[in-house]
Amino acid sequence: MNTDFIEALSEIEREKGIAKDVLVDAIEAALISGYKRNFNTAQNVRVDINRQTGLIKVFARKTVVDDVLDPRLEISLPASREINQNYQLGDIVELEVTPRDFGRIAAQTAKQVVTQRIREAERGLIYNAFVDKEDDIVNGLIQRQDQRNLYVDLGKIEAVLPLTELMPTDKFKQGERVKAYITKVENTTKGPQIVLSRTHPGLLKRLFELEVPEIYDGVVEIKSVAREAGFRSKIAVHSRNSEVDPVGSCVGPKGVRVQTIVGELKGEKIDIVHWMESVEEYVANALSPSKVLEVQVFEAEKMARVIVPDYQLSLAIGIKGQNARLAAKLTGWKIDIKSETQAEQEYGRPKSSGDEMQQNSVSID
């Protein structure tokens, strides 16, 4: 060790943000283990590195006792007073035992410790940079793929995008850019691990927050999201300003805002629903693009019975029940859909005049 090494530690402190004293303390601790390992000693020792000159000294620490049972750890009172007359029983005496060739061991140990601490610090910086981005969107480049994951280069770190978190319509090649949602940021023993998703409902939510200024500004609020990734999604929005149309804001001029999101999601259909405090109106809106005649609410069961025109029944239910299923997820209510004829036969509901409930929603294919 010399002054050049101390200056190097100061440079690391400036560039990496690791305090020099922290590095020196870590090197001293590592040198104690190195000393015991290389010199086959069980002594209680202390290593001291001079913060100005870099000079290293090793001191054996011995306790002052009446009867010495282990000379490696103990020293008699008379012997201690030959060093300093002020020593008393129980005091600790330090004797320099620095080996002649200890510098070589010290240099190797110091290099290992500094390298490890720099690696840990860099991992910490990366973790801190991404931990606040959990539940946010990131852009990256596809690096490689194995049987279970895609690996995405985010610049300072490689994130994991499980194949199970890809939409059915996703087809990515190496070097292609991908936009994904961060579901988890963990600080593991191997460093930070970032897990991404393309199927999470949060991806749709964040895309709308980024594309729609009214949502970003807080004028329009996203109340709920239901998604079957790659196929169809429903998003319920509400305006805090009566003069701002929440559905229109999300659609954008000539549909440009929502079409941008549809493009990012590889053609996923999106129903934008006007959230209403009235359960009847909310459920009717959620079943878009189907028209609704009547909604009957059963609070105890948290169930809504929906009556639709006969010709709208299949549209209300959707392919394999998708539309009804998404509407139920969006609203949090069980939804039982009946055609007008079924309602008349089962519940004796009289035929309607054909008037449909007023709905405020839009479907984008």
Image (tube, grey):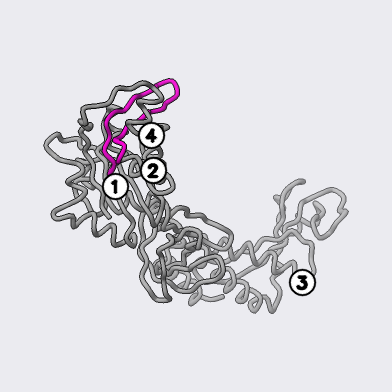
| Sequence-earlier tag: 1 or 3 | 3
| Residue 10 x %, y % | 44, 68
* Residue 132 seen in the current view: yes
Label 3: state its secondary structure. Answer: loop
Q: Which-is-in-front pick, marks 1 and 3?
A: 1
State the separation of the CA atoms marked 1 and 3: 74 Å
Q: In this figure, which residue is indicated by the disc labeled 4?
A: 337
How many angstroms separate mark 1 from mark 2 (CA)? 10 Å
Verify CB contact (< 8 Å) between mark 1 and mark 4: no
Residue 271: mark: 1
Q: Amino acid at mark 1?
A: Asp
Reading the image, the residue beneath label 3 is 39
What are the residue bounds of the magenta stretch?
Answer: 289-311
The kind of residue on which mark 4 rests is: Ile
Q: Is residue 273 left or right of residue 150?
A: left
Check contact, mark 1 vs mark 2: CB within 8 A: yes
Residue situated in front as seen by the camera: 269 or 162: 269
For this view, does 57 lie left or right of residue 299? Answer: right
Give the spatial CA distance, label 1 vs label 4: 18 Å
Q: Could you tell me the amino acid type at mark 2?
A: Leu
Type of the residue with mark 3: Phe
- Residue 235: x and y in percent read 31, 44
- Dot 2 or dot 3: first in sequence order is 3
Image position of 34 with respect to 261: above or below: below
